[in-house]
Amino acid sequence: MNKNNDHVNDRAIDEREWQAQERAMREAREGTASTDPMAMRYRRVADALREPLPDLLPPDFAAQVARQAEANATAPVIAEPPADKGFEFNLMRGLLGLLGLGSAVVAAMYGRAWLAPTLELLHLDSNVAVNWALALAACVGASWLTEQLRRRRESAAHAA
């Protein structure tokens, strides 16, 4: 059976460390030198803490921030992304197109196998499902159309 008395030694070490820290702080306030190596180590920490932090901001920092804020407030707002949309954007469009095409092919090939059980599970007949699909298509179409109108209006306002 092992007996671990390390917690007793830890308290003694902690007390010595505490006393060394307090001695270093007191000697730093009084300006006296210490002969204890542990207190001398903490004296360097105490001296560093007594020094003010260096001022890293330039003297005209507030004026620079005010000029930047004024420039940002008067700058025109860019409504559309740049003309060069980049490789990633075109790749994303292509992959989304492939996903849509693949979904349409899978729905055409296996639609009868899963459409009837799904409608039965939801307690819907085919007329209700068609009505919901038409309502969804109308909502998506209306959202797309209003976005196109908003973009045209903004581009006309920026052109004027």
Image: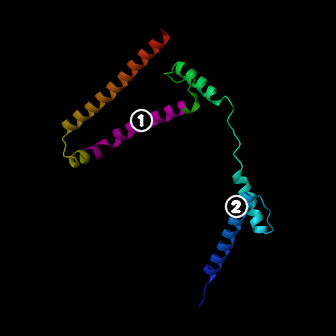
Foreground of the two, 145 or 40: 40
- The residue pinned by badge 2 equals 25
Foreground of the two, 16 or 130: 16
Circle 2 SS class: helix
Q: Classify 10 Å Cα crowding around label 1: few (below 14), some (14-19), many (20 and above).
A: few
Q: Is residue 102 left or right of residue 126?
A: right
Q: Quadrant of residue 133?
A: top left
Q: Tell me the CA gap for discs 2 and 1.
A: 71 Å
Specify start and end residues of the magenta stretch as a single range. 89-115
Residue at 32% across / 25% down in the picture? 142
Vertical comparison of 67 with 126: above or below: above
- The residue pinned by badge 1 equals 100
Vertical comparison of 29 with 116: above or below: below
Numbered circle sitting on residue 140:
none
Q: Per the image, is 151 magenta?
A: no
Residue at 74% across / 55% down in the picture? 47
* Residue 90: x %, y % from top left: 54, 30
Residue at 51% across / 34% down in the picture? 92
Task: Give the amino acid type for the residue marked by disc 2 in the picture.
Answer: Met
Task: Give the amino acid type for the residue marked by disc 1 in the picture.
Answer: Gly
Circle 1 SS class: helix
Foreground of the two, 62 or 35: 35
Vertical comparison of 45 with 125: above or below: below
Q: Classify 10 Å Cα crowding around label 2: few (below 14), some (14-19), many (20 and above).
A: many
